[in-house]
Amino acid sequence: MGIAVTGNVGSDKLIISAALTGSWPTKARNPAVPITEEEIAAAALECRQAGAAIVHIHVRNDQGRVTCDPARYARVRALVEAHGSDLIVNMSTGGGAGQTTDEQRMGPVGLSPEIASFDCGSLNFGPTVFVNSPSFLDELAARMQRHGVLPEIECFEPGHVANALRLIEEDKLKPPFWFQFVLGVRGGAPGTVKQLVHLIDMLPPAAIWSVCGIGRAQLPLGVTAIAMGGHVRTGLEDNLYYRKGELVTSNAQLVARLVRIAGELGRPVATPAEARAILGLQPRPAAT
Ligand code: ZN
């Protein structure tokens, strides 16, 4: 057992999630953002090579805009599996604030992905409002359970952890509890170490946590999580720059940097099989 943090199960092995596309980034802002299913699957495979165990995916329509079309989600997963990859595919249920209905957002859950995002509360999100009402969360939790999906409990601020604790108390979320702190969204908690520590302090016993910092918070929060025994998400969904003034050239570039840093900090990177064991997911056949 490595570094443990109060209220958290520490792990030597580091789970790296790569959030490849998101709902909003465009090729106009960074040409490396994968948009088509083929591009997303290719980016996923590169990230696996670089050290990611999980890819968190969104899909886009032919105009490059956010959609929740289950057929497109299924195609990305099928392309990844067609290469014999053992990657864990985490499908977003985030949709696009104001662009997609609650029902559309739940579409990918019917595909029984191993993990799907569970945005555990509402918040201002840039210029709009990202609505995750209590009734939506109840329904999403029920459907995920029915389809054998592990919810990735995304918390953008401390109130979202409080929502999760309530859902746990009501037995609507069941262990294992896999939390993703999303910090630095305009409208959510700032991307600071102080916020991260506070959120970790709120976690229920035996929770497993990861953090993604948005924009310039991505690297410092990622490194902090590695040092604290947590897990980390990176990728172009959250940040388009490798460093100030220099665009990221691929999702894998960001994964590779974390792998190097984790090596220095004594956190070997979890394979997908090891990540499944940590997260209580069913084992899958080894990659060919
Ligand atoms: Zn996402």
Image (cartoon, rainbow, N blue to C red):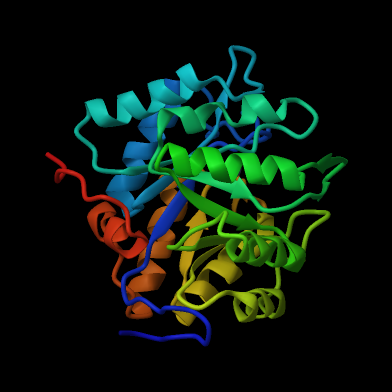
Q: Quadrant of the N terminus?
A: bottom left
| 259 and 158: which is toward the camera | 158
Question: Which residue is drawn at the image coordinates 30% and 43% (left, top)?
Answer: 87
| 63 and 3: which is toward the camera | 3
Q: How far across and how far down the image is residue 186, in percent?
A: 81, 54
User: Does residue 34 appear left or right of residue 240 in this picture?
Assistant: left
Indicate the quadrant where residue 198 lies: bottom right
Kindly give the residue lying farthest to the front in the view shown. Answer: 170
Question: Which residue is drawn at the image coordinates 32% and 77% (left, top)?
Answer: 12
Question: Which residue is drawn at the image coordinates 50% and 78% (left, top)?
Answer: 205
Indicate the quadrant where residue 132 lies: top right
Q: How far across and how far down the image is residue 217, in percent?
A: 66, 64
Kindly give the residue lying farthest to the right in the view shown. Answer: 127
Q: How far across and how far down the image is residue 136, in percent?
A: 70, 40
Question: Which residue is drawn at the image coordinates 31% and 70% (left, top)?
Answer: 13
Q: How far across and how far down the image is residue 219, in percent?
A: 57, 65
Examine the rendered structure and indicate whether residue 71 appears above or below residue 212: above
| 159 and 219: which is toward the camera | 159
User: Does residue 144 appear left or right of residue 136 in this picture?
Assistant: left
| Residue 250 in view, yes or no | no
User: Does residue 97 appear left or right of residue 74 in this picture?
Assistant: right
Examine the rendered structure and indicate whether residue 174 appears above or below residue 252: below
